Image (spheres, grey):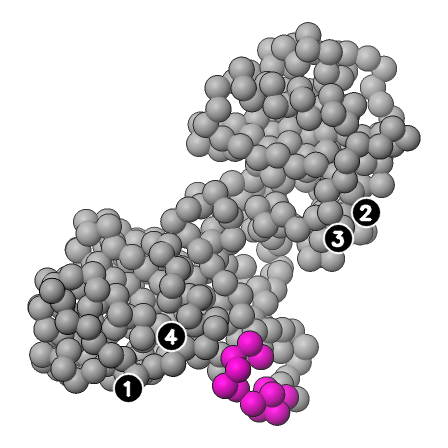
Amino acid sequence: MQKTILIRYKPHAGQLEFHMCPARFRVLDCGRRWGKTIAGANELIRQMWTQGPNIVGFAVAPTYWHTKRQWTEFFNFCPAELIKEIHRSDRHVILKGNRNIWFKSADNPDSLRSQGVKVLWVDEGAQIAEEAWTLALRPALMDEKGIAFFTGTPRGHNWYFRLWTRGQDPSQMEYKSWNFPSASNPYLDPAEIAAFARDMPELAYRQEVLAEFLEDVGSVFRGVDCMVQGSFQPFERHKQYVMGADLAKLEDFTVLCVLDMDGHLCAFDRFSQLDWVFQRKRIVQLAERYNARLLIDSTGVGDPVCDELYRENVRVDGYKFTNATKKDLIENLSIMIENQQLTIPQVPELINELKLYGYKTTPSRNVQYGAPEGYHDDTVIALALAAWQLKRAPPPGRGAVMPY
């Protein structure tokens, strides 16, 4: 029977919630002086002891100086009875049971390549190059099906933000993320926060103290947080409604968005891994419930889908996607959001996809819109298809395909 080890650490409520979460990948986004590095060090100790003997753990930070903080906090809390050997020259600790921990900086991502990492702690991940995670650290977890947890303060909409958004999506069962401002640390004097923030610019204050992921220059949609208002609304006879649907492709989701003519999102549905028969039934039911005019992607297989829905008496039309028409659709949505013409309830999947959605310029200088690689944009497209109809007159009848 494994001996119980006492760690002299009293976590506050936010830290305790982080420690108790069983998700494989956890992202702790915090303001300065919240206690994130202390929480990370204690979680490293706990996981290295509970995951079993003969394992490897990594503690990774942006620079050698950052790893020194990890090293210091680790030894501030690690009980001496757990330690077998300390190799200070290369920051390598061996705990009893052949539990090896390496403290590494991410200056050179190639140095992070390894096999069989069971426990990974990344501190200040927003300051680490994406390739360190995607090409070195994430593959190192595969052999042992290792766990990873991240502690840090935000810095724009980079890979760390994208990882954090996965933890906000209920469908991403292996991920969990939190956002804690500095003031949520009960051990921190409010006067200290005020002194720290007094001479800071507003944007710096919001990032460093409130722990906000601020929209950067590459964002397509500005003002997403301002559009989050109200709740879902039932059908009202005196209102008209429009609906956008993005149909699942391979591992994507089918997403349905219903807007009233004031631009409020009244209904939202998102599902995957359903046969088309059941998908069609849910689409038809929602369209009938709101007597909504439906616009879907009619590119390729979308045309017969339109025909099937039309036979179900749905007022449906198709939208042909090309680079040019997608650009029109997304830019229309962007303008409507920036002009505060749309409002949505608190829907984490939609909010996060809107914030992640970006663009890139091709070698031929064309602009291409889309979600970052490995992420979804289904909710964005469904909302854009619904919003496209708001400023346009209803089509005269079945067969109108928008735009040309």
Who is closer to the viewer here, 337 or 169?
169
For the residues labelled 4 and 3, the Cα–Cα distance comes to 34 Å
Q: Residues within 10 Å of mark 4 (few under 14, many from 20)?
A: many
**In the image, what residue occupies the spot 56% across and 22% down?**
279
For the residues labelled 3 and 1, the Cα–Cα distance comes to 45 Å
Query: In the image as oriented, which residue stretches furthest toward the right?
Result: 238
The amino acid pointed to by label 3 is Gln
The amino acid pointed to by label 2 is Gln
- Of badges 2 and 4, nearer the viewer stands 4
Quadrant, the C terminus: top right
Identify the residue under disc 1. Answer: 76
For the residues labelled 3 and 2, the Cα–Cα distance comes to 12 Å
| Up/down of 387 relative to 210, above or below | above
User: Considering the numbered disc 3 on the image, is that residue within a helix, a strand or a loop?
Assistant: loop
The amino acid pointed to by label 4 is Ala
Q: Which numbered marker is on residue 103?
A: none
| Up/down of 284 relative to 222, above or below | above
Q: Position of residue 232 (x, y in %)?
A: 73, 42
Q: Position of residue 247 (x, y in %)?
A: 57, 26
Q: Quick one: label 4 or label 3, which is nearer the N terminus?
A: 4
**In the image, what residue occupies the spot 21% across and 76% down?**
5
Q: Position of residue 116 (x, y in %)?
A: 17, 55
Identify the residue under disc 3. Answer: 229
- Of badges 3 and 2, nearer the viewer stands 3
Looking at the rendering, the stretch of residues picked out in magenta corresponds to 183-194
Quadrant, the N terminus: bottom left
In this image, 331 relative to 247: left or right?
A: right
**In the image, what residue occupies the spot 28% across and 63% down?**
120
Q: Quick one: label 3 or label 1, which is nearer the N terminus?
A: 1
